Image (tube, rainbow, N blue to C red):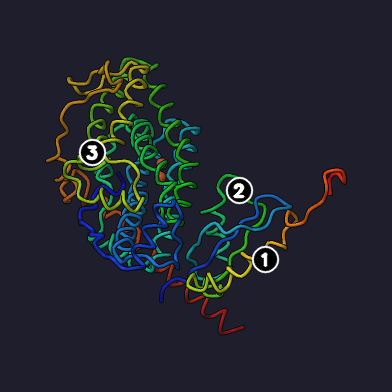
């Protein structure tokens, strides 16, 4: 059997989200955390680590990019700059 | 460089709406991500390049590992241990990047252990004295940096991101090596002679690290078109020579090349003819340490088998108990 693959996420500082940094192979979750520590945090890069079985991640298909993300392209009224506020009103 | 053995020509004659869109994305400096459409040749080329690079990092641990137990002080030992551990890490970042293209770690390992995969010719030279450890950090890591910095902008996202991590760590490797050589050069005449001897043996093999000259390097054109590669072998080699020669002169060392001279007109250091026959022989498996390196790798793999098996058996047992 091949050794399972895990995706590694690192939180560099409190206040930041965990960020994907790469993957490791490990037989179980404990060993995956240990391997992730050795491979991705040798210079104080992390305050916290997540490892997630790679097969547990569900990804959007790049082929669906247009149908998923394009519709928001035309909805410019979702942005503050769409609206006019006279200069005299000042910052809003 | 670490992927100098790439020698199969990939053709990009593939023309289809997909292929055209792909090339347009590359030309627009967009990054290609794992699930995106890509030509088969691009995928094959990347798997080969990234895995050769990974193998080089892993095999590259062996010549330096040879000196960990004999480092002359605790400071040097701690630094060398950290450096060799980094190289193992580099190998792992790169294997992960290669796996995003649909190969398994086990396949890649198997290619290395059965001798079907290539790795950089430089790691088939022996580390005879402590001065070799300094010289490897200074020159081999120095050459690696030259090659890896442009790879941080490689068109394939996971490879580029792995390279950014690697480059952040390489600078320490080169500086610790240079410091070792500097210390030897400021030491006794015997120590300085050791440094000179190491430079004499490593200089020419380091120049071949950048791969064959542009005139007969067969993969450059498509790699450049796909922006996997951004500079030619000869351009990177010249950059390396220009950066390194003044450093060697600062150390008071002489380069083993009677033709080496500064071309005032271009500002480049001109160097003599490289022995490409030796390069090809080392690449083909006939360097001083090829057999030893692969044997060491196989031995480590075989002797670690029971650990991998036990870890998997334990994990299976825990799952069944749950
Ligand atoms: Fe490295
Ligand atoms: Fe290095």
Residue that numbered label 3 is attached to: B208
Residue B64, compared with residue A82, is above or below; it is above
The answer to which of marks 1 and 2 sits earlier in the sequence is 2
* Circle 3 or circle 1, nearest the eye: 1
Q: Is residue B73 visible?
A: yes
Labels 3 and 1 share a subunit: no
Q: Position of residue A85 (x, y in %)?
A: 82, 51
Question: Decide: marks 3, 1 in contact (CB < 8 A)?
Answer: no
Label 3 to label 1, Cα distance in Å?
56 Å
Chain ID, mark 3? B
Q: Which is nearer the eye, A33 or A84?
A: A84
Q: Are marks 1 and 2 in contact (CB under 8 Å)?
A: no
* Residue A32 position (above or below residue A55): above
The residue at the point 31 percent across, 66 percent down is B40
Residue at mark 2: A45
Question: Helix, strand or loop at disc 3?
Answer: helix
Depth check, front residue: A62 or B109: A62
Output the chain of dot 2.
Answer: A
Where disc 1 sits, the SS reads loop
Q: Nearer the viewer, residue B149 or A60?
A: A60
Residue at the farthest left position: B277
The image shows residue B37, relative to residue A92, as above or below, that is: below
Which residue is nearer to you in this view: A76 or B53?
Answer: A76
């Amino acid at each position: 059997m091949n050794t399972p693959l895990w995706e590694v996420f690192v939180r560099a500082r409190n206040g930041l989200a965990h960020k994907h940094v790469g993957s490791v192979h490990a037989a179980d979750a404990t060993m995956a955390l240990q391997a992730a520590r050795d491979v991705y945090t040798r210079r104080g890069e992390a305050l916290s680590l997540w490892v997630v079985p790679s097969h547990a991640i569900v990804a959007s298909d790049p082929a669906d990019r247009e149908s998923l993300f394009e519709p928001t392209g035309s909805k410019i009224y979702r942005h503050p700059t769409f609206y006019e506020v006279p200069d005299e009103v000042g910052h809003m | 460089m670490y992927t100098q053995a790439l020698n199969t020509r990939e053709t990009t004659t593939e023309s289809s709406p997909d292929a055209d869109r792909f090339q347009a994305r590359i030309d627009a400096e967009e990054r290609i991500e794992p699930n995106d459409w890509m030509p088969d040749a691009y995928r094959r080329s990347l798997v080969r390049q990234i895995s050769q690079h990974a193998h080089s990092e892993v095999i590259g641990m062996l010549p330096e590992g040879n000196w960990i137990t004999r480092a002359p002080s605790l400071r040097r030992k701690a630094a060398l241990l950290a450096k060799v551990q980094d190289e193992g890490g580099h190998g792992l970042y790169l294997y992960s990047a290669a796996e995003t293209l649909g190969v398994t770690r086990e396949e890649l390992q198997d290619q290395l252990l059965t001798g079907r995969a290539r790795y950089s010719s430089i790691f088939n030279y022996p580390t005879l004295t402590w001065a070799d450890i300094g010289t490897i950090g200074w020159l081999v890591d120095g050459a690696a940096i030259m090659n890896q910095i442009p790879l941080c902008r490689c068109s394939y996202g996971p490879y580029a991101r792995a390279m950014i991590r690697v480059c952040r760590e390489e600078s320490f490797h080169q500086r610790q090596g240079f410091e070792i050589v500097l210390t030897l050069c400021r030491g006794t005449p015997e120590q300085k002679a050791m440094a000179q001897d190491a430079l004499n043996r490593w200089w020419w093999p380091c120049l071949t690290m950048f791969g064959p000259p542009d005139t007969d390097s067969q993969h450059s054109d498509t790699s450049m078109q796909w922006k996997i590669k951004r500079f030619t072998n000869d351009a990177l080699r010249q950059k390396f020579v220009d950066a390194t020669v003044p450093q060697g002169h600062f150390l008071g060392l002489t380069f083993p090349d009677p033709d080496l001279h500064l071309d005032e007109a271009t500002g480049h250091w001109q160097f003599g003819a490289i022995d490409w026959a030796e390069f090809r022989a080392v690449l083909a498996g006939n360097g001083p340490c090829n057999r030893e390196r692969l044997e060491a790798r196989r031995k480590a793999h075989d002797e670690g088998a029971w650990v991998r098996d036990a870890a998997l058996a334990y994990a299976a047992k825990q799952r069944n108990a749950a």
